[in-house]
Amino acid sequence: MEFSEVIDRRRSVRHLNAKLAVSDEDVQALLEAAVAAPTAGNIQPWRFFVVRSADARERLAAALHQRWAAAAPLVIVVAVDPRPCAARYGDRGEYLYSIQDTAAAAENILLAAVDRGLASCWIGAFDEGLVSEAIGAVQPITPIAVLPIGYSAESAGRPARRPLEEVTTWL
Ligand SMILES: Cc1cc2nc3c(=O)[nH]c(=O)nc-3n(C[C@H](O)[C@H](O)[C@H](O)COP(=O)(O)O)c2cc1C
């Protein structure tokens, strides 16, 4: 798929086909896309939890309080270990770069999913403690984004964007 088409087609899809599995090859491609993202100082503080078993997916969906996510045949939880960022860059590394690094990885996963005919939605509204418990993440490793992934069972329209003139300053 052309890159511009990937950008244009990506939507937050919240109805996924529970019966169609995501192949191992696709999972591998999504993870490789994730780690192709840039990170401050190439520290790569990310951790990925690949959730595929029915038990784990159910536990995770309950922790999220977003039941629709239980239908996803695959969930990738993008998490961060902020320690190496803090050690190299202090507070800015711990609170900003570590989040930016993992957000870039999450976006790469969303785009790679579209490229492979899959759909996803970035979930950020969750209780960190409950999600950590559901996936077995131990502090200070912290979940940043939960990405349910599968084949779309909806045709989502394109949500409006604020006009570029409103959000852009030209100097
Ligand atoms: C940081 C972040 C957190 C989000 N959290 C949620 C969420 O908890 N639940 C949800 O259904 N969508 C969530 N979304 C998806 C947004 O609602 C969605 O991106 C936005 O409405 C624009 O729609 P689009 O992605 O289809 O362009 C989140 C997106 C981002 C970037």
Image: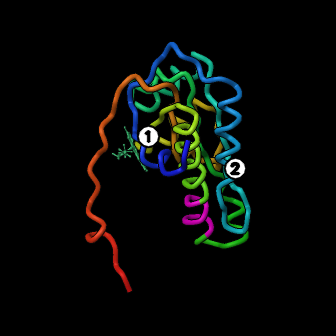
Location of the C terminus (image quadrant): bottom left
Tell which tag, 2 or 1, sits nearer the viewer. 2
Label 2 CB less than 8 angstroms from ligand 1:
no
Image point 46% across, 22% down: which residue?
Answer: 70
Residue 53 vs 97, above or below: the answer is: above
In the foreground, 148 or 29 = 29
Image point 44% across, 42% down: which residue?
Answer: 10
Residue 154 vs 147, above or below: the answer is: above
Read off the magenta span: 93-100
Q: Quadrant of ligand 1?
A: top left
Label 1 CB less than 8 angstroms from ligand 1:
yes
Label number found at residue 126: 1
Query: Would you say 134 lies left or right of 5 here?
Result: right
Disc 2 target residue: 35
Q: Secondary structure at mark 2?
A: loop
Residue 102 vs 87, above or below: the answer is: above
Across and down, in percent, residue 146 comes to: 51, 39
Q: Amino acid at mark 2?
A: Val
Residue at the extreme bottom: 171
In the foreground, 9 or 78 = 9
Image point 61% across, 27% down: which residue?
Answer: 51
Across and down, in percent, residue 5 comes to: 47, 46
